[in-house]
Amino acid sequence: MKRTRWQTALLVAAMLAVVPEAPAVAAAARTQRRPSIGYVYPAGGKQGTTFQVTIAGRYLDGVNNVVVSGGGVKATVVEHVKPLTGKQINLLRDELKVLQQKMKPANQGNPKVGGVTKTAGNPVTQTDRAAIQKEMAEIRKKLANPKNRNRENQQLAEDVTLRVVLAPDAVPGGRELRLKTNLGLSNPVAFHVSQLPERSEKEPNNKAADTSELLELPLVINGQIMPGDVDRFRLKLNKGARLVMAASARELMPYIADAVPGWFQATMALYDKNGNELAYADDYLFHPDPVLFYEVPRYDEYVLEIKDAIYRGREDFVYRIAVGEFPFVTSIFPMGGPVGVRTSVAIKGWNLPVNELTLDAKDMEPGILPVSVRKGQLVSNRVPFAVDTLPEYPEKEPNNRQAIARKVKPPLIVNGRIDQPGDLDVFCFEGGAGDEIVAEVYARRLNSPVDSVLKLTDATGKKLMANDDHEDKGAGLSTHHADSLLSTKLPANGTYYLYLGDAQNKGGDAYSYRLRISPPRPDFELRVVPSSINARAGTMVPVTVYALRKDGFSGDITLSLKDAPKGFTLSTGRVPADKDQMQLRLKVPLIPPKQPLSLRLEGRAEIQGRQVVRPAVPAEDMMQAFIYRHLVPAKDLKVVVIGRAKPGTPVKRRSQKTVVKPTPAKQPKSK
C-alpha cells in the first residue's frame, strides 16, 4: 500500500519515539543554547494602540530588548518568568518544611508565654512569625506556578511579557519580532499591524451560550486553541453585508516544534442562532488557513466557530481572525507581465473598489512583487505579481487537443487559465535536434490553486517526458510543490506539443498559470542561515549559505558583504562549482555595537558571459513532522555582538638556545 506523506511522517515520528537518542546528537542538543521563541500572543494589534503580549520560549535569560522589523512599533520587556528546575523545587520544599517546623509550637496547650510563641526550636516573636509567614507564602506562590507543574514542552518553558506601542501611522502588514537576551537574538516570529479594532478571546467560550457579549464589526479576534478546545463568538450582522472572515494560524507559526505533523490545522464555520451551519472552510484554495465569504441574508445573530481539524491544541496554536466588510482579493489575471511596460490586470474578490488595475513595471527588476488595493483607509490582502524579461503571449481557447493546439515561438511566457474542470491547454512549437528546452509552470507560487501537470510529445503523440510536481527549495513555506517543470534535449527536427492540465481535474476563474517555454536560463538564488546571528566581540561565527541553482547552472558563486558596518568581514567568500551550500565565517568587530545591526550578503557569478548578482535572502532552517526541512525566508538578516573579546593568553618567547624535546606519543594500551 502506498503511504501518503502524512502517514510517512507519523510513522517516522513513531519510530523516533522508541529509538534511543544517539550520543553525538544528544550532546549537540545539550550544548546548543540559541534563544528561541515558541509563540507570541496576541500576534499583533491595531495602529495607535498600546497593549501587552505574552511570549513563550526557551533560553531567554537576561531578555532586555525587543527588535521589530519596520517602523512605528515600540516594545519593552515587562517581565520574564522562568520555571524552576526539579532541584530548585525540591530545595524550596525543604525550606518550606523548615519554616513550618519553626512555626510549630513545642507546647500545644500553652503556646504563648509573655507574648512569645514557644516553638520546637528557639522562641519566635510576633514580628518573626509575620516574616516567616510572608516567606512561606512566597515559596508557595513559586511552587504553585503552573509552569513548574507542566513542563512537558521545553520549547515553551519560559514566559516573557511585553508592552507594545503601535504608532497611529505604523504601516499595516506583517512584521518580524525578535528578543535580545544574554545569549543574543532569538529566531524571528510573525507579528502583525492591523487597521481593525482587536479583541482577545475570553474563556469559557466553547459554547455559544457561554459568550454573552455580541461583538461589533469590523474587528480582529485573537485566540489560542488548547486540546479539545472549540472557540465560538457571537456576531450581530446586518442584511446584505458581504462578510469576509479570514483566519491566520499556519501563517503565524508555519512549523511548530515538537508537534506532529508540525502545525495547527484550523477550521472555521458560521452558524445561525439556531445552530444551523451556513458556511464552512478548512482551508482557502490551497492555503491551510481558512477564509469564509458570506452574504448576510437578514439582520440577525450569528455564531463564528474556530477549532483544530482533529481537536488537537497547545499554547502555540495561536490564531487571528479578521472579520468584516474589508477588501479581499481572490484572484488576478494575468498573474504577471513584462519588464518596462504597463500591464492591465483584472482583479476579483470581495468588497473591491475596482475590478481592474494597471501595473507599471517600467522601473522594476524581474521578480515577484506584492499587489493590493485600497478601499477608503483599508488595504486588502496582498497577492503576488511576476515580472519577467521574456515576451508574453495570452492563451486562447479552444486549444484542448493536438489538432487545435496553439502555435507558439519560444522563448516566451504564456498567460493562461484552466477554465473548467478537465480543461487541457495544448501548445505546439518547432524544434531542432539537440535543442535544449525548458517548460516551467508558475501557478502555486503565484497564489493560484492549479496543481499542474506537464507532458511533452512529438508530432506522432509519443510521450517524451512528463512532470507533476517539481520542488522549489526557494518556496520555504510550501509543503506541496505543485508547479511542474520539464527540461530536455529534443531528439529530432520537427513539431512538438506541450500539454498542461490540472492533476486534480479542477478548474475555474481562479485557476490561472504562467507557462515559460524557453532554452535554459541558468541562474541562482541564495539563502543565508540563520537569520539571527549571535557572536562575541572580536570572534568569528559560522553562517551557512545555500545556493539554489536553476536551469543547470553549476558555476562558482562569489560571496561578499554589501555596505557592511565597519569591522564586519567574511573569512571565505565562495560557493564552489556544483556545490549547493557552503559554511562561511563572519568576523565581528572588537568593539560591540550598542544595537543589533542589519547585514546584507550577495553573490556574483559569471553566466553565459555576463555578471549576475543576486541577494542572499535570510532564512531559518526549520523542520516539520520530524523529517521535512524548509528554508523559511525572513525579512532581515540581524546580527548582535555580545560583550567583548576575551583577552588572549600572553605568548612566552623562548630563548633561541632552549631546546624543546618533543613529547613522545602515548601508545595505546594492549587489550
Image (cartoon, rainbow, N blue to C red):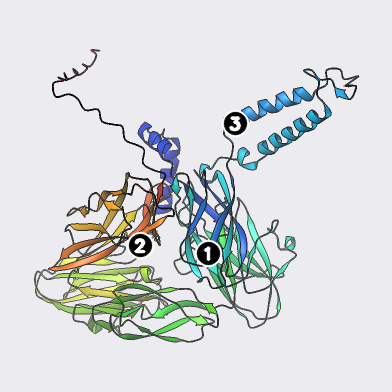
Tell which of 32 and 317 is nearer to you.
32
Mark 3 or mark 2, earlier in chain: 3
Which residue occupies 78% across, 28% down? 128
Q: Is residue 368 above or below residue 77?
A: below
Q: Secondary structure at mark 3?
A: helix
Q: Secondary structure at mark 2?
A: loop
Q: Can residue 4 be seen?
A: no
Look at mark 3 in the image and give the residue it sits on.
Answer: 88
**Number of the front mark, 3 or 2:** 3
Mark in front: 1 vs 2? 1
- The residue to which callout 2 is attached is 475
Q: Which residue is mark 1?
A: 73
Question: Which of the marked residues, 1 or 2, is nearer the chain's N terminus?
Answer: 1
Please say if 242 is above or below 271. Answer: below
Residue at the spot 50% in from the left edge and 65% down from the top edge: 283
> Which residue type does callout 3 highlight?
Gln
Element under disc 1? strand
Q: Amino acid at mark 1?
A: Val
**The image quarter in which residue 339 lies:** bottom left
Q: Residue at x 32, y 67 (%)?
A: 483
- The answer to whether 316 is drawn above or below residue 408 in the figure is above
Q: Residue furthest top?
A: 670
Q: Quadrant of residue 215?
A: bottom right
Q: Is residue 92 left or right of residue 116?
A: left
Above or below 619: residue 506: below
Which residue type carries mark 2?
A: Ala
